[in-house]
Image (spheres, grey):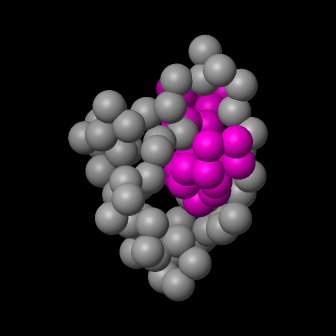
Amino acid sequence: MDYNFKDIYISRNLKFSIGVEESIEKYYVSFLVPTSNRKSDYEIYYWLPVNYSKYVYSEPEKIYSYVLECCKGLHKGMEIDLS
């Protein structure tokens, strides 16, 4: 599937972004995953659960706890397969 991601919030301080996949109108978060050589970091995307969507426009920094959980591998089922 081809996705049409559009960032709507970028936190340079916390290093994550929130956006919407425009064709299905679903929110996502993305962040960089470091590699061992730090020369080829890559961006990973996760669907944002509905219970966090209330914070997208009002308090996006509250979504950061979910991002940290994703970094720890706690929400693998929400990872977006880009292949």
Q: For residue 68: magenta?
A: no
Position of the N terminus by quadrant: top right
Spot occupied by residue 22 in the image (x, y as percentages of width and height): 71, 48
Q: Is residue 63 left or right of residue 32?
A: left
Q: Residue furthest bottom?
A: 58
Q: Vertically, is 54 above or below 40?
A: below
Spot occupied by residue 59 in the image (x, y as percentages of width and height): 49, 82
Q: What count of labels does the image hold?
A: 0
Is 9 or 34 nearer to us in this picture?
Answer: 9
Q: Which residue is located at x 71 percent, y 25 percent?
A: 2
Q: Is residue 6 left or right of residue 24?
A: right
Spot occupied by residue 6 in the image (x, y as percentages of width and height): 74, 52
Is 1 or 79 nearer to us in this picture?
Answer: 1
Q: Vertically, is 28 above or below 34?
A: below
Q: Vertically, is 16 above or below 3?
A: below
Q: For residue 26: magenta?
A: yes
Q: Which residues are magenta?
A: 18-44
Q: Which residue is located at x 62 percent, y 43 percent?
A: 24
Res. 10 image quadrant: bottom right
Q: Is residue 83 left or right of residue 76?
A: right
Q: Which residue is located at x 52 percent, y 23 percent?
A: 81
Q: Vertically, is 49 above or below 54?
A: above
Position of the C terminus by quadrant: top right
Q: Let me know if residue 9 appears in the view.
A: yes
Res. 32 image quadrant: top right
Q: Residue furthest top?
A: 83
Q: Which residue is located at x 44 percent, y 52 percent?
A: 48
Q: Residue furthest front?
A: 24
Res. 65 image quadrant: bottom left
Q: Let me know if residue 34 appears in the view.
A: no
